[in-house]
């Protein structure tokens, strides 16, 4: 589904991704871990199409297409979803209108007519129930005045609405209390199918108890320096990144 | 009729040989004498520096005549209710009007100010020439000197109207460029509550220059909502002078949509004549191309315990210019004044310009006065976020711009009119130029 080859990217002339290689197949869950500032969010942003990051090398193939040739809205319609580490507040745009526009555009892309108002509200209600989003939020402006946890839940709600092929969840667990964490993980698991894939970026083993990854990668200094199974997360929890960093610093 | 170049001659020449002026000759004489003292503003005149007078006065004008409008031109103004209370004016002259049968026994007056001088002289006297602006204004003096007619709205004590009263003004040229003036008087009697929708349109594409003056009186405990729509075409210049007199416990809420016009200058002056009154001024403007929209606001807190609030928001496209001056004067004994002002602008291009100037002059010590002004571009973070949900750039921008204006447009308390305004804003924000939207033939159901 996703094949990243030797991806390099910079911002303001500063190289941040220094050659990423990663392959994600349908049905898989990958976790990306790594110290602060290692480039995890940058990788997510580059995949979503944020233009402040300049891709200076490498290839990204998504469902057989050259992803890097698509603008962000096309990537979304093709099936990429990024749950933001810091969801953006949009004063004056209600969640309902926001999602209406998004769902419309996704349907148009697939050749479907827009839903009528009542169909849409029914659809929204169904998805809200799935991720246990508070009903009071829908009339409010997107993320405006939301608590940290509400913002993260709202990301998962949007994911449920758009049913992506590849979801990238950037620290969706940070700032969540244990109940909210379970709700969010539960939502993600319910949305999981054999056809879609998930990349979870996290600092904590705790999330991985609920969203169980097939493969774990460690990103450090703009490179994936280690890849392993579930046991890698437990190892990191115990020993931290010191060993991996030292080893990587020697290699590069 | 001859065409006069105002730069070389004077407005007096334009009006020479005509008669039937509104104000008594004694007042008019005083006004015309003032022209020795105040000159047509140019880019060096204080408070008028950004006013693009050249673009107005490079044309020759003749006086607009008393012409007719066709009812089909009104059809497209979807907010208008022909069975409701209304006055229609053309080039400043009364054209037609209606008072609903059910309102006849309320003794309300909705019609020509010129006519009302005969029937309502007592009510009108003393309210026609208040000349209360702090800063002498050439155009209000000009209106005093030569205005011939306009709308008079009088709602006597204790009358409450649910439906809005419409004042609709049309610029219409038979041939050539038109100069016209209208003089309006709105009296909201004690304990009244009603709404006015005051709109300006043009029916021809010749150049026009319209100098309007509206005196508004909110008597004790009156509650007046005043919606102003400036929709004269993009070959139209409009100077709109509005004077608000607020009596004890009154509430005046206005909402100004400046949608079209080559140069639009709003001179708004509000004075608290007594305590516990409230004045709320909101405005939006969306100039494009080479348009200039210039809002000049003066609020005089002469008495204690009054509240004023200004919120003006603009989206400035292409090479357009927006000017905002918000003066708030708080007299020494106007304690417990509560005054807020905010001007926010979105620039859509590198050439668009904004000049925003708050001016607070405060002589009382127990007051709350705030002001803020921001000028910026659309939020790129928000745009990216929306795009990652599949929303294309254009649609996302439109949504963000609408959202920016929403807190002002949402406060329009007349459904049909709000829908009309939102319809035009949507079209405009989707990229349709004002020229094509300022025609009265554009409407939600046309
Ligand atoms: N817009 C930007 N301008 C300049 N530098 C940036 C920008 N965005 C990211 N960086 C830098 O790139 C590096 C990687 O940042 P990134 O946000 O990808 O890290 P991260 O792995 O997600 O960290 P965290 O775990 O703290 O979220 C950091 O050094 C950061 O300062
Ligand atoms: Mg990050």
Image (spheres, helix red, strand yellow):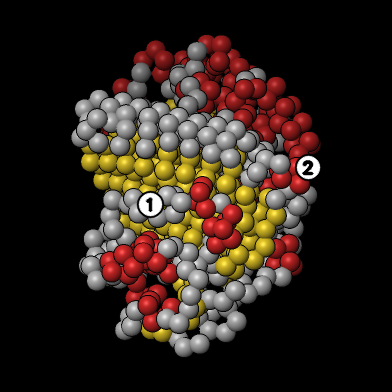
- SS at circle 2: loop
For this orientation, the residue located farthest to the bottom is: B2
Residue A40 x, y percent position in the rendering: 42, 35
* x then y, percent, for residue B191: 55, 32
For label 2, count other residues whose C-alpha is less than 10 Å away and answer few (under 14), some (14-19) or many (20+).
Answer: few
Residue A54 screen position, x and y as percent:
39, 52
Residue B397 visible in rendering: no
Mark 2 and mark 1 on one chain: no
Residue B3 visible to the viewer: yes
Q: Secondary structure at mark 1?
A: loop
- Tell us which disc is closer to us: 2 or 1: 1
Relative depth, front residue between B188 and A10: B188
Q: Is mark 1 within 8 Å of ligand 1?
A: no
Residue A194, given in percent of the width and then of the height, sits at 71, 32
Depth check: give the residue in front, B442 or A161.
B442
Residue at (35% x, 57% y) in the render: B323
Residue A13 is left or right of residue A109, and the answer is left
Separation of disc 2 and disc 1 at Cα?
56 Å
Q: Which residue is mark 2?
A: A116
Query: Which residue is drawn at the image coordinates 60% and 82% (left, top)?
Result: B174
For the point 32% across and 52% down, which residue is it?
A: B133
Give the quadrant of the C terminus of chain B.
bottom right
Disc 1: CA contacts within 10 A as few (<14), some (14-19) or many (>=20): few
- In-image side of B404 versus B307 (left or right): right
Q: Which residue is mark 1?
A: B130
Q: Nearer the viewer, residue B175 or A111?
A: B175
Quick check: B366 above or below B440? above
């Amino acid at each position: 589904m996703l094949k990243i080859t030797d991806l390099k990217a910079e911002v303001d002339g500063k190289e941040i991704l220094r050659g990423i290689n990663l392959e994600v197949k349908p049905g898989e869950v990958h976790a990306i871990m790594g110290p602060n500032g290692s480039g995890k969010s940058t990788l997510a942003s580059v995949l979503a199409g944020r233009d402040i990051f300049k891709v200076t090398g490498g290839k990204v193939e998504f469902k057989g297409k050259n992803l890097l040739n698509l603008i962000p809205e096309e990537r979304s319609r093709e099936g990429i979803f990024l749950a933001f580490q810091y969801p953006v507040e949009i004063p004056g745009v209600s969640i309902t209108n926001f999602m209406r526009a998004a769902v419309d555009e996704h349907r148009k892309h697939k050749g479907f007519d827009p839903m009528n108002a009542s169909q849409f509200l029914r659809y929204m209600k169904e998805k809200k129930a799935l991720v246990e989003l508070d009903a009071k939020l829908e009339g409010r402006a997107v993320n405006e005045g939301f608590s940290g946890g509400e913002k993260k839940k709202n990301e998962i709600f949007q994911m449920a609405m758009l049913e992506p092929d590849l979801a990238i969840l950037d620290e969706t667990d940070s700032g969540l209390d244990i109940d909210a964490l379970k709700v969010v993980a539960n939502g993600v698991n319910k949305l999981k199918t054999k056809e879609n894939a998930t990349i979870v970026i996290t600092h904590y083993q705790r999330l991985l108890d609920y969203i169980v990854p097939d493969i774990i990668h460690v990103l450090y200094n703009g490179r994936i320096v280690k890849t392993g199974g579930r046991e890698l997360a437990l190892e990191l929890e115990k020993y931290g990144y010191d060993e991996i960093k030292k080893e990587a610093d020697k290699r590069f | 009729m001859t065409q006069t170049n105002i730069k070389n001659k004077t407005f007096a020449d334009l009006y020479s040989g005509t008669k039937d002026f509104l104000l008594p000759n004694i007042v008019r004489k005083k006004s015309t004498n003032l022209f020795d003292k105040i000159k047509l503003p140019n880019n060096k005149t204080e408070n008028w520096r950004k006013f693009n007078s050249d673009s107005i006065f490079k044309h020759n004008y003749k006086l607009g005549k008393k012409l007719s409008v066709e009812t089909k031109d009104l059809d497209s103004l979807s907010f208008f209710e022909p069975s409701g209370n209304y006055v229609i004016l053309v080039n400043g002259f009364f054209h037609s009007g209606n008072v609903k049968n059910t309102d006849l026994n309320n003794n309300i007056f909705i019609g020509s100010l010129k006519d009302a001088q005969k029937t309502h002289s007592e009510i009108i006297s003393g309210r026609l020439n208040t000349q209360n602006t702090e800063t002498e204004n050439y155009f209000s003096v000009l209106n005093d000197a030569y205005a011939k007619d306009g709308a008079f709205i009088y709602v006597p004590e204790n009358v409450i109207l649910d439906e809005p009263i419409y004042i609709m003004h049309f610029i219409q040229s038979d041939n050539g460029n038109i100069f016209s003036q209208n003089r309006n008087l709105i009296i909201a009697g004690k304990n009244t509550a009603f709404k006015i929708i005051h709109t300006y349109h043009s029916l021809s594409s010749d150049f026009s220059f319209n100098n309007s003056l509206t005196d508004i009186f909110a008597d004790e405990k009156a509650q007046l909502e005043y919606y102003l729509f400036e929709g004269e075409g993009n070959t139209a210049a409009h100077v709109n002078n509005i004077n608000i007199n607020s009596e004890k416990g009154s509430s005046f809420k206005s909402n100004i949509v400046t949608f079209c016009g080559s140069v639009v200058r709003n001179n708004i002056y509000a004075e608290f004549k007594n305590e516990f009154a409230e004045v709320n001024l909101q405005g939006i403007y969306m100039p494009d191309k080479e348009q200039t929209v210039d809002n000049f606001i003066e609020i005089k807190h002469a008495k204690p315990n009054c509240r004023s609030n200004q919120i003006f928001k603009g989206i400035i496209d292409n090479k357009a210019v927006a000017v905002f001056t918000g003066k708030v004067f708080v007299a020494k004994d106007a304690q417990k004044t509560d005054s807020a002002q905010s001007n926010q602008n979105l620039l859509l291009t590198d050439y668009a310009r904004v000049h925003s100037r708050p001016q607070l002059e405060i002589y009382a010590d127990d007051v709350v006065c705030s002001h803020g002004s921001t000028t910026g571009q659309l939020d790129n973070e928000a745009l990216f976020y929306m795009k990652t949900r599949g929303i294309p750039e254009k649609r996302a921008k439109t949504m963000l711009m609408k959202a920016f204006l929403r807190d002002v447009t949402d406060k329009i308390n007349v459904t049909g009119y709000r829908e009309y305004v939102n319809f035009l804003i949507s079209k405009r924000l989707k990229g349709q130029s004002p020229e094509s939207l300022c025609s009265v033939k554009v409407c939600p159901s046309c």
